[in-house]
Amino acid sequence: MIVFGIESSCDETAAAVVKDQKDVLSSVVSSQIDTHKQFGGVVPEVASRLHVENISTVIDQAITDSGLAWDDIDLISVTQGPGLIGCLHVGVQAAKTLSLLTGKPLVGVNHLAGHIYANKLDTDLKFPLLALLVSGGNSELIYMKDETSFEILGETQDDAIGEAYDKVARVLDLGYPGGPKIDRLAKQGQPIYKLPRPKAPGEYNFSFSGLKSGVLQFVKRMERENKEWKVEDLAASFQETALEEIFTKVRKAIENHPDLKQMIVGGGVSANSRLREKVAELAKRYPNMEFNVPPMSCCTDNAAMIAIAGEIAWSHGRRADQTLCADSSLDLDF
Ligand code: KG4
């Protein structure tokens, strides 16, 4: 099956053509980061307008790069949600128009399912599996007994981990997006500063807002007391505490679910080098399980993962028509 995917849930306008959930025939991502940088984060209204400006060009480029014609496409798949509502509307409207013009069937998919299925680009999924979703909008630990069942074991009670990276980067004047910058700085520092350990209710839930405030208070205290401190060490301390919040819960989930065959990671923060090291450490500790982090190009938002999600949804009977509507808080289920 050859699927044309469209993604516009946040600040990337993307389109891709994927064959049989594996072969990426084309993948075009137009990032708005340079525009949002000047505001220190994504401005939803600006993001929607940029999607409107870019989406036709991105779609055109994706079909040209694939070397195929519209006649060769079997299905059009689009991110229905969750995400920024104005942004989602642009992708959904474009997909509906394409479907109308080409006569090709349409399916709307969940953005988070896309991040999970992105792992199919370099591995086969083995169930039951544990999925860790870590992005700018989500932090979730999900148990999947099969391809279409998503049992949320835990989730963030406040900020998403990527949001915490971005907010801490703002406090440290590092610019947007903060994740890659903190990642780089942390490599040159040591986690020597004591920051508040997050406390979230429940066995597998996360919390990051106390840690984020802890970084701000640390900086203020150092300034007030006129003490020297190193931004590299603070970046390393924040990163280590934030990732330990995640990995403590991951280890608990693995211990409590001995049937797990695999753990996969998805979302923008899965590009983080220390997170990748920690996944490699888990792989050594649990040799009976497989561990996978998607290729760097598929960690952040892209449309190849939406095309894959579309084929899976389609094969399980999901259908959409011209009444398809964007849903900013779409649930992760089938
Ligand atoms: O999945 P994504 O592209 O967008 C959504 O949130 O859906 O994720 C973007 C997030 C941003 O918060 C960014 O700071 C974070 O991913 N990020 C990272 C790294 N690269 C991107 N966080 C930590 N380390 C990184 N290397």
Image (cartoon, rainbow, N blue to C red):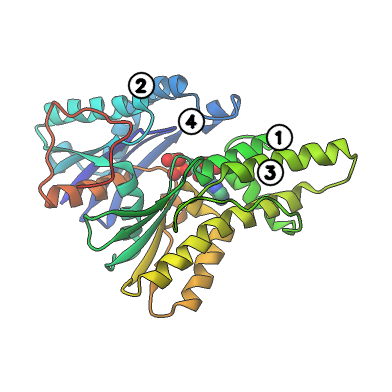
Looking at the image, residue 189 sits to the left or right of residue 318; the answer is: right
Badge 4: how crowded within 10 Å, few (<14), some, or many (20+)? some
When asked about the image quadrant of residue 169, the answer is top right
Report, in whole angstroms, how far the alpha carbon at label 3 lies from the one at label 1: 16 Å
- From the viewer's perspective, is residue 66 above or below residue 250? above
| Amino acid carrying mark 3 in the image | Gly
Q: Earlier in the sequence, mark 2 or mark 3?
A: 2
| Amino acid carrying mark 1 in the image | Asp
Kindly identify the residue that appears in the image at 46 percent across and 63 percent down: 250
Badge 1: how crowded within 10 Å, few (<14), some, or many (20+)? few
Report, in whole angstroms, how far the alpha carbon at label 1 lies from the one at label 4: 20 Å
Q: Nearer the viewer, mark 3 or mark 4?
A: 3
Report, in whole angstroms, how far the alpha carbon at label 2 lies from the one at label 3: 39 Å
Q: Nearer the viewer, residue 276 or 67?
A: 276
Kindly identify the residue that appears in the image at 22 percent across and 53 percent down: 19
Q: Earlier in the sequence, mark 3 or mark 1?
A: 1
In the rendered image, residue 84, in percent from the top left (x then y), is placed at 38, 29
| Amino acid carrying mark 2 in the image | Val
Report, in whole angstroms, how far the alpha carbon at label 4 lies from the one at label 2: 12 Å
Residue that carries the numbered disc 3 in the rendered image: 214
Within 8 Å: ligand 1 and the Cβ of disc 2?
no
Residue that carries the numbered disc 2 in the rendered image: 52
Residue that carries the numbered disc 4 in the rendered image: 32
Q: Are marks 2 and 1 in contact (CB under 8 Å)?
A: no
Residue that carries the numbered disc 1 in the rendered image: 173
Q: Which mark is residue 198?
A: none
Q: Are marks 1 and 4 in contact (CB under 8 Å)?
A: no
